[in-house]
């Protein structure tokens, strides 16, 4: 299911967190749990990964992660503000040190001129640090490719917060 490169990246995230005795959590929308899945593909991941959320709907983002209704209404589910709120919400709701969030449009439908298919927002949070955000526009890749690229970006961003 996961490429050798993605598995290696997951191993590095876990090793970085383990070396610093940090716990992590994921908050996912368009990846549907794939970030947590690739991390748990690695034996021994349970000493680092505390939990993950798949909050596909706006209601789930509000209920499970505390994303403010105004954030969703004003900026939309696929936005920097929502990605940041998801990462912050996961950090405030779990006994962890760092989190990563992802929200985007994987297609093949659902895109607009303002929010095209392939638009994905990421955020990584760590206690006592600024939240890191990245926006990626993957373009006309397949749904599978957008989701796998999103997992790679999310893990890379999480590693930056673990340094």
Image (cartoon, grey):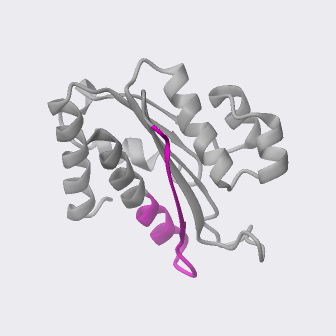
Relative image position of residue 40 (x, y in whole percent)? 30, 39
Picture coordinates of residue 34 (x, y %)? 43, 49
Q: Residue at x 49, y 42 (%)?
A: 131
**Horizontal side, residue 27 vs residue 77: left or right:** left
Q: Is residue 54 visible?
A: no
Towards the viewer: 42 or 154: 154
Q: Residue at x 19, y 29 (%)?
A: 20
Image: 22 above or below 74: above
Boundaries of the magenta span: 130-150
Q: Is residue 52 magenta?
A: no
In this rendering, the answer to whether 115 lies above or below 151 is: below
- Say which quarter of the image contains residue 43: top left
106 relative position to 22: left or right: right
- Does residue 109 appear anywhere in the picture? yes
Where residue 39 appears, as percent x and y from the top left, is: 30, 42
* Residue ranking furthest to the top: 95
**Does 136 lie within the magenta span?**
yes
């Amino acid at each position: 299911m996961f490429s050798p490169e993605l598995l290696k990246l997951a191993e590095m995230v876990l090793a970085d967190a383990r070396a610093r005795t940090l716990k992590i959590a994921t908050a996912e929308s368009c990846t549907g749990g794939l970030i947590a899945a690739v991390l748990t593909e690695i034996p021994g991941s349970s000493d680092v990964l505390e939990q993950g959320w798949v909050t596909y709907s706006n209601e789930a983002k509000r209920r499970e992660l505390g994303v403010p209704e105004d954030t969703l209404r004003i900026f939309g589910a696929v936005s920097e503000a929502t990605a940041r709120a998801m990462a912050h919400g996961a950090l405030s709701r779990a006994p962890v040190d760092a989190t990563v969030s992802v929200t985007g449009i994987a297609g093949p439908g659902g895109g607009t001129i303002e929010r095209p298919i392939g638009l994905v927002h990421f955020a990584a949070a760590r206690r006592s640090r600024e939240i890191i955000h990245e926006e990626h526009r993957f373009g006309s890749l397949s749904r599978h490719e957008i989701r796998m690229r999103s997992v790679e970006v999310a893990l890379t961003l999480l590693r930056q917060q673990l340094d």
